[in-house]
Image (cartoon, rainbow, N blue to C red):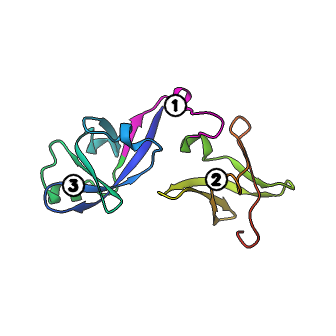
Amino acid sequence: MLLVVGRIGRAHGIRGEATIEVRTDDPDSRLAVGAILQTEPAKKGPLTIASGRVHNGTLLLSFAGIPDRTAVEKLRDVLLIADVDVAAESDGDDSFHISQIIGCEVYLTDGIKVGIVSDVLSSAAQDTLVVTANGIQKLIPFVDEIVPDVDITNRRIVITPPEGLL
């Protein structure tokens, strides 16, 4: 399955490095030196990762054939796409791919529908579900205490939000 594993951000320095918004649980292998990634839009790729490093908590990548800041700026907001075997990648019951979560219906424990997962924001601290209902987005930390039940088969997530979260 083709999955978005990152988004190219702004240029960093003058040597062709770009900041990367990581959208994968396994950046060490999916965004490794030598990896060839498809892109969206497709005409911007494929891109081969030439180097990678972390600077102040931000992943910086350079790509083969992209020599300088000017060339990197033309790639800003391009999505990086990898071919991932979702079934083989699962680490158990608590491991999900973003593509499996997006579109799931979210309910409170009493059965009241909260909305539908429209996105998952990834950060170093935790993932956050973006749940949309009636055009309003709600951010819900994707942690066991708040999201105790994820049923991928039935596309249903049950949450127990602390008072004031919603």
Quadrant location, the C terminus? bottom right
In the image shown, does 70 or 166 lie closer to the viewer? Answer: 166
| Segment tinted magenta in the rendering | 80-96
The Cα atoms of the two marked residues, 1 and 3, are separated by 29 Å
The Cα atoms of the two marked residues, 1 and 2, are separated by 22 Å
Q: Label 2 amino acid?
A: Val
| Residue identifier under label 2 | 117
Up-down relation of residue 22 to residue 49 (above or below):
below
Q: Residues within 10 Å of mark 3 (few under 14, many from 20)?
A: many
Residue furthest to the bottom in view is: 164
Describe residue 82's horizontal placement relative to residue 51 as left or right. Answer: right
Q: Earlier in the sequence, mark 1 or mark 3?
A: 3
Q: Residues within 10 Å of mark 2 (few under 14, many from 20)?
A: many
Q: Residue at x 74, y 62 (%)?
A: 161
| Residue identifier under label 1 | 89
In the image shown, does 27 or 73 lie closer to the viewer? Answer: 27
Q: Label 1 amino acid?
A: Glu
The Cα atoms of the two marked residues, 3 and 2, are separated by 33 Å
Rendered location of residue 40, percent (x, y): 36, 45
Magenta highlight on residue 83: yes
Q: Earlier in the sequence, mark 3 or mark 2?
A: 3
| Residue identifier under label 3 | 17
Q: Residue at x 27, y 38 (%)?
A: 46
